[in-house]
Amino acid sequence: MGTHRAFAKLARSATALLAAAGVALAAAPIAAAAPASATDNDQVLSWTEMGEWGPKANDFPTVMVNQGMTENISPEGTNVQCVPAPGENPVVMIHGMNSNSYQTYARMAPELKAMGKCLYAFNVGKLGPDEFSVLGSIPTMRNMTPLDTALAELTAKIDTVKAETGATAVDIVGHSAGGALAAAYAKQEQGRGIGTVVSLAGVLHGTTLLGASYGLEQLNQFDNAGDKAAGYVVSPSLVDLMQHGQFMAKINEGGLEQPGVNYVAISTQVDEAVTPMAASQWNAPTSNNILLQDGCSADLSGHIGLTFSPRAIALVANALGRNVEVPCVPVTAVFEGGINDNANVRPEHVNAVSGGITEIDGRIAQAAGAR
């Protein structure tokens, strides 16, 4: 009977790991897509190690078709010579795990650029020739390495941004794992040289990933098999982002937020990747935690689609010093950024989806014996 229970737990844990891989696979590119092309004569700076601009895309499926297998596409409006407006900082935009800058900011960057922001968006965390993961074998995937490695790359790039622009501080926008890196960078620098950090569905305190972390912890009883499997199938960065990950423990030890930094978090109630929702919000009383659906239940942007949401883009712009109207545009999470003018979404619909996510997380936790 004991052996049967052990194998049953392993089966449930394997299911949780497959759920984690499933979320990551949602970002896998479409192999037959055509390469993107630049849309402006501005010269992308060579030190950014990024390619020409890709076309603006208003939703996630479109950006995937645009990109195909082309690496290091710059989001339109980024990585060119620019000088911030007086009293403003250059903005560094950081992408998430199993993603890249173009996939993440193909809509947001050109819209912020049109508002006069000076933007840089780099790709960090590419697996080296001696490193491997199944998803990491897709050439466009970034933020795959251990997050300490990506943080070192980001630090060097921000140093160059300051040197090139003459700025003494930067603002940072980070999505998903990019939010974790933004928080880690601000803590590493003890708040010096950072004005505002905007986290978009950022992993700030470790995610259960719809209960997958509980399964990994169960498997870790067998020679750390859970984390090894997650690192091999998805990426080493996934292990760092889990609630039991050492990277999360390190950046949260003694408190995450730093004095003098303006912290803003934008979370979505239907986030299927950063669970529970509190994992994407700041703890300091001086921080500003914004829920996308507050005042707009019609916007059902999920984890991947959040950076394409017109509402989220306006919230980011205002966090960076603009004063624009924050729209309430119906968005269906199914299309990850797709606008549906005929959507009739009511608060009870949002609560039902959010409650379902919470229930899944809880049921997997119970099955894995974590609660």
Image: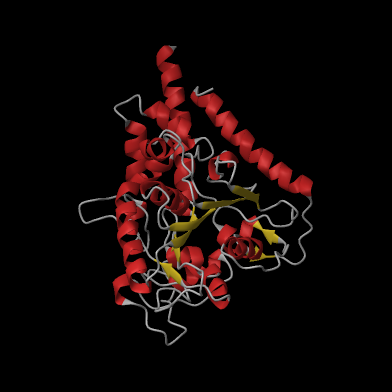
Above or below, comparing residue 108 to residue 303 in the picture:
below
Q: Nearer the viewer, residue 233 or 176?
A: 176
Question: Which quadrant is home to the N terminus?
Answer: top left
Q: Tell whether 331 sits left or right of 232.
A: right
In the rendering, at what x and y percent does residue 228 appear?
32, 37
Percent position of residue 286, x then y: 59, 45
Residue 116 x/y as whole percent: 54, 76
Quadrant in which the C terminus appears: top right
Residue 126 appears in the rendering: no
Residue 241 image offset from top left, x and y in percent: 42, 42
Q: Quadrant of residue 250?
A: top left
Closer-to-camera residue (89/363) = 89
Q: Is residue 344 visible?
A: yes
Instruction: Quadrant for residue 311, please give it.
Output: bottom right
Q: Residue at x 30, y 57 (%)?
A: 153
Q: Residue furthest top?
A: 1
**Relative horizontal placement of residue 276, taking residue 149 as reference (left or right):** right
